Image (cartoon, rainbow, N blue to C red):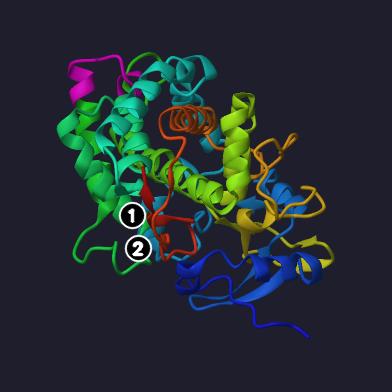
Amino acid sequence: MTPDIDIFSAEPYGLGVPHDQFAWLRANAPVFWHPDPDWPGFWALTRHEDVTYVSRHPALFSSYRRSSMLYDADEERLRRDRMILLNQDPPRHTALRAVVNRGFTPRVIARLEDHIRAVCHRLIDGVGTGNVDFVTEIAAPLPLHVICELLGAPPEDHERIFRWSNRLIGFDDPEVRAAHTDPINSLFHYGVTQADARRERPADDLISRLVSGEDTLSEVEVGMFVTLLAVAGNETTRHAVSGGMLAFFEHPGEWERLLADRSLLRTLPDEVLRWVSPLMAFRRTATRDTEIRGQRIREGDKVVLYYAAANRDEDVFPDAGRFDIGRDPNPHVAFGGGGPHFCLGAHLARLELRVLFEVLAERMPGIRPAGPARRLVSNFINGIKELPVTV
């Protein structure tokens, strides 16, 4: 008997990721035709093999045609969204990524470790003792400070960058979205303004690198990249951190394991990312007729890659329903399934997670939950709005 499947509506995600539905789909209908309120329907992919296959064949499954977003947009919105790296296909994507990648090489990111550790200690210094919200005090400000440091944004701009990015990913959640605001335009114009300023007075930051030298980005490209970075580099890491802390609360044996053996910090970030899957799904559009597992996919069909489901695929991850910070190997798809859109900030995200949990284990070994987590209402971001803790 086929259960009622709805993995698209945002409201149920406010209670948690529907892993029971994902498990049924992986076992019984890994290429599943799902109804869609704005489209004739879409193909939901929940197996690791299929998610990676589609990710690595951009000529067959396009990010550009209808963008990577789950919800469909009109042509005017699509024209704007297609300027973002996330919604481009090779060769344009390849050329643009080669420029922005200069700021995300392992060598560049490694230089940030001392800064990230200092931020972690400063945040913990400011927490004090008693009951606090882990999201507000630690999980949210850490990646915000790091991304603003990368961009060269002055401290007085941090709060509004956070506010814009929060509203951008929280459009489904009535507590987060704000009427009469357009966070994409706000972030875009901020990036353009900063690009203009760096052309006049270059500094040692990412925006200066993007607008100087032989291969540079236009004002529009910088604005769109800042918009992307505010979400991809800020919000996703924030929710990986808070989701990782919640995972430790739900599996206290793993926290004790970390306290006893810091060598587990090497594998911890990837297991947190697999377990949480902060970015749960992206969309592709078929560019011609094809097949996946015998299901006919027609040109123009909407295909949704469910990373949160693929990261619990029992054929790839032994004991997939167990949070295991020593899991190795760990071929998760939290950074995408490979191919041209593999996450640009993978090195940075791993570094932030490793350093933060190292500092937490050192400074707050007795941290414990002080109440239930409150989740973001979103079918896109696996987010936690509030996580009360006692420190």
Residue 3 in the image: state x and y as whole percent. 70, 82
Please indicate, yes or no, whether residue 129 appears anywhere in the rendered image: yes
Q: Would you place residue 50 above or below residue 241 in this image?
A: below
Residue sitting at x 66%, y 39%? 338
Label ID, residue 252: none
Q: Secondary structure at mark 2?
A: loop
Image quadrant where residue 47 sits: bottom right
Magenta highlight range? 197-210
Q: Crowding at label 1, few (<14), some or many (≥20) Cα neighbours within 10 Å?
A: many
Would you say the residues marked 1 and 2 are in contact, meaning their CB atoms lie under 8 Å apart? yes
Residue 340 in view, yes or no: no
Q: Which of the labelled discs sits on residue 171, or is there none?
A: 2
Res. 168 mark: 1
Say what secondary structure mark 1 lies in. Answer: helix
Q: Nearer the viewer, residue 359 or 19?
A: 359
- Dividing the picture into quadrants, the one containing residue 21 is bottom right
Front residue of this view, candidates 361 and 216: 361
Where is residue 215 drawn, in percent x and y?
Answer: 42, 19
Q: Amino acid at mark 2?
A: Phe
